[in-house]
Amino acid sequence: MSGESAPSLTFTSASPSDTKRLGERLSRHLQPGDVVLLQGDLGAGKTCLAQGIGRGLRVKEPVKSSSFVLVNEYNGRLHVHHADLFRLTDPQQVFELALEENAADGLLLVEWPEVAPRELPPEHLLVRFEIVDARTRRITMAARGARYKDVLNALNAPTPEKTHGRA
Ligand SMILES: Nc1ncnc2c1ncn2[C@@H]1O[C@H](COP(=O)(O)OP(=O)(O)OP(=O)(O)O)[C@@H](O)[C@H]1O
Ligand SMILES: [Mg+2]
């Protein structure tokens, strides 16, 4: 899943709640049909970021690591399809999940996309997690496709300061 360089943003997270807040921030810029791939070692924080996205989309139930279920679905501002491909070994199994088709009306989040990169949409936001130390994660978001450049630009734009007093 490497290759040509793509516009990217890098964040440093100092705690699980930092990572959740980043997911929440990202969620504000997501729309139906978007695809976010979450790549990183075991315990790197992929599900943690997905939980923040779920919170930002006002999903009621907690977003979990699915031990047996390959795809969990949640309803919030967007219909979330959260897939974990860790246990799959054959790209054909991923093909059979028809993730892109099933999630076309909502948001597709995929953990362990490297199991079957060719079975996943070529245009996506690739989020890479690196474990720096016990509490620190380096999180890099790279845009694959014009839609995701827009997402990164929106995420990078300064948030308007809250104004106090008379308008
Ligand atoms: N800055 C951080 N951001 C996210 N998680 C952190 C951070 N610091 C420590 N952690 C811990 O790292 C773990 C991340 O777990 P999480 O389930 O999100 O990983 P994952 O990448 O989804 O792993 P898996 O591949 O097993 O699904 C949690 O135990 C969390 O408390
Ligand atoms: Mg996980």
Image (spheres, rainbow, N blue to C red):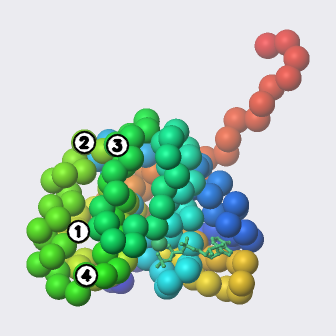
Residue at 79%, 13% in the rendered image? 167
Residue at 40%, 67% in the rendered image? 66
Circles 2 and 3, Cβ within 8 Å, touching? The answer is yes
* Gap in angstroms between the C-alphas marked 4 and 2: 25 Å
Residue 37 picture location, percent across and down: 38, 67
Badge 2 local density, few (<14 within 10 Å), some, or many (20+)? some
Q: Is residue 54 above or below residue 50?
A: above
Residue at 20%, 57% in the rendered image? 100
Amino acid type, callout 1: Leu
Sequence order check: which comes first, mark 2 or mark 3? 3
User: In screen coordinates, is 124 left or right of 53?
Assistant: left
Q: Closest to the observer: 128 or 103?
A: 103
Residue 161 picture location, percent across and down: 76, 35
* Gap in angstroms between the C-alphas marked 2 and 1: 16 Å
Q: Which residue is mark 4?
A: 88
Q: Which residue is mark 3?
A: 79
Badge 3 local density, few (<14 within 10 Å), some, or many (20+)? many
Residue 73 picture location, percent across and down: 34, 51
* Gap in angstroms between the C-alphas marked 4 and 1: 14 Å
Q: Secondary structure at mark 2?
A: loop
Residue 141 picture location, percent across and down: 50, 67
* Gap in angstroms between the C-alphas marked 2 and 3: 7 Å
Q: Closest to the observer: 163 or 101?
A: 101
Q: Secondary structure at mark 4?
A: loop
* Gap in angstroms between the C-alphas marked 3 and 4: 24 Å
Q: Which residue is mark 1?
A: 120
